[in-house]
Image (cartoon, grey):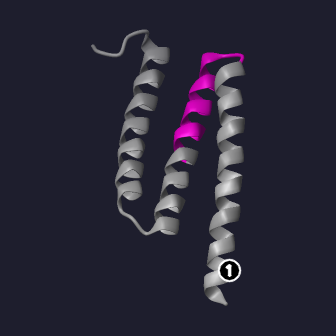
Amino acid sequence: MSIVILYWGINISQLFLGLAMILSFIRLARGPRAQDRILGLDALYTATLMLFVTFGMRTGTTIYFDSALVIGLLGFVSSSALAKFLMRGEVIE
C-alpha cells in the first residue's frame, strides 16, 4: 500500500514541478524588470533541482542526485553574481 502511495506521490510532484518550471520560465521571459527575471531564474533552477531529485527517487540511480547538486551550486553562484551586477554594475571588483 505505501509503495503505491509513494509512486503516485512522486508522479504528482513531478507534474507540479513541471508546471512550476513552465510558470517560472514565463516569468523569466516576460518579467518587466531585471529583478523579476532573476527571481524567475531562481525559481527555475530550484524547480529543476527538485525535479532531478524526484527522478533520482523514482529510478533509484545516483546520477540525478549528483546533477541536482551541481545545479544547486551553479544556480546559487549565478544568482549572487546577477544580483551583484544589478546592485553595482560590475561583477568583479
Majority secondary structure of magenta residues: helix
> Mark 1 highlights which residue?
5
Whether residue 42 is situated above or below residue 57 in the rendered picture: above
Q: Badge 1 local density, few (<14 within 10 Å), some, or many (20+)?
A: few
- Of 56 and 21, which appears nearest the observer? 56
Camera sees residue 46: yes
- The vertical placement of 15 against 26, above or below, is below
In the image, residue 39 sits, relative to residue 58, either above or below, namely: above
Q: Is residue 81 left or right of residue 1?
A: left
Q: Quadrant of residue 44?
A: top right
Q: Does residue 35 sit above or below 65 in this rendering?
A: above
Q: Which residues are magenta?
A: 32-46
Residue 47 location (% of width, % of height): 58, 47
Which quadrant is the N terminus positioned in?
A: bottom right
User: For the point 51% across and 59% down, which residue is it?
Assistant: 55
Residue at the limit of the structure toward the top, as seen here: 89
Quick check: is 88 in the magenta stretch? Answer: no
Residue positioned 43% across, 69% down in the render:
60
Q: Tell which of 2 and 23 is nearer to you.
A: 2
Residue 33 magenta: yes
* Three-letter amino acid code of the residue under disc 1: Ile
Residue 42 percent location from the top left of the image: 55, 36
In what element is the residue under mark 1? helix
* Residue occupying image coordinates x 41% and y 55%: 64
